[in-house]
Amino acid sequence: MDQNPLILIIRTLGHLYIFILLLRLILQVSKADYYNPISQGIVRLTQPVVSPLQKIIPKLFNTDISPVIVALLLNAIILYTVYALGNQFIPVVTLSIYALIGIFNTFLDIIFYAVLGSVIISWIAPDSPHPAPQLIMQVTSPLYRFIGKAIPPIGGFDLSPIVIFISIQLIQSQLRPFII
């Protein structure tokens, strides 16, 4: 099924846009700087498809969930297209479950790479004025504070990234059989 170049293009472009949609949600939830140029670019890229749903779907816990809805629909369309191009049928319920699991897996990937980036930034350029490291640190600091409440630093060494990495790997190992 993955031998078809059209399927590769559809999956790659679709998942890239899903990544950007979920990144928008993560930036909003972590209360990252809205005026950061990268945040502004993400909003500009996603606003045309998110805007119609923002008028219909109410906020949940003061958070706009329309990027998640769009990402879920887009992932379902991608999965349906991949199966259809492979001359296979997928039931709607199965399609919905696979789409939801795929979105959650992408969300975990974003968190994983953000934490990895923050660890590298803390070694190389901890006080960088560049917008990308600032955004990464703003996204990961709420996670570090949350984990730090349960596991305080030991000898000045913060174990939060390690706990996050292990947790994500454990969750993704359970999701792997369901990811297409």
Image (cartoon, rainbow, N blue to C red):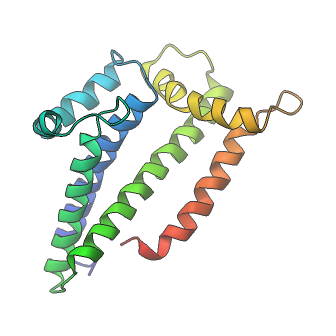
| Residue 178: x %, y % from top left | 42, 74
**Identity of the residue drawn at 29% across and 40% down:** 65
| Residue 158: x %, y % from top left | 76, 33
**Identity of the residue drawn at 35% across and 37% down:** 25
**Identity of the residue drawn at 14% across and 79% down:** 84
Which residue is at the far right? 155
Above or below residue 161? Residue 4 is: below
**Considering depth in this image, is 108 or 55 the residue closer to the camera?**
55
**Considering depth in this image, is 65 or 12 the residue closer to the camera?**
65
Above or below residue 180? Residue 49 is: above
In which quadrant of the rendered view does residue 46 lie?
A: top left
In which quadrant of the rendered view does residue 26 lie?
A: top left
Quick one: quadrant of the C terminus? bottom left
In which quadrant of the rendered view does residue 67 lie?
A: top left
- Residue 131 is left or right of residue 173, and the answer is left
Quick one: quadrant of the N terminus? bottom left
**Identity of the residue drawn at 23% across and 36% down:** 58
In this rendering, the count of numbered labels is 0
Above or below residue 35? Residue 132 is: below
Above or below residue 106? Residue 76 is: below
| Residue 47: x %, y % from top left | 17, 32
**Considering depth in this image, is 112 or 167 the residue closer to the camera?**
167
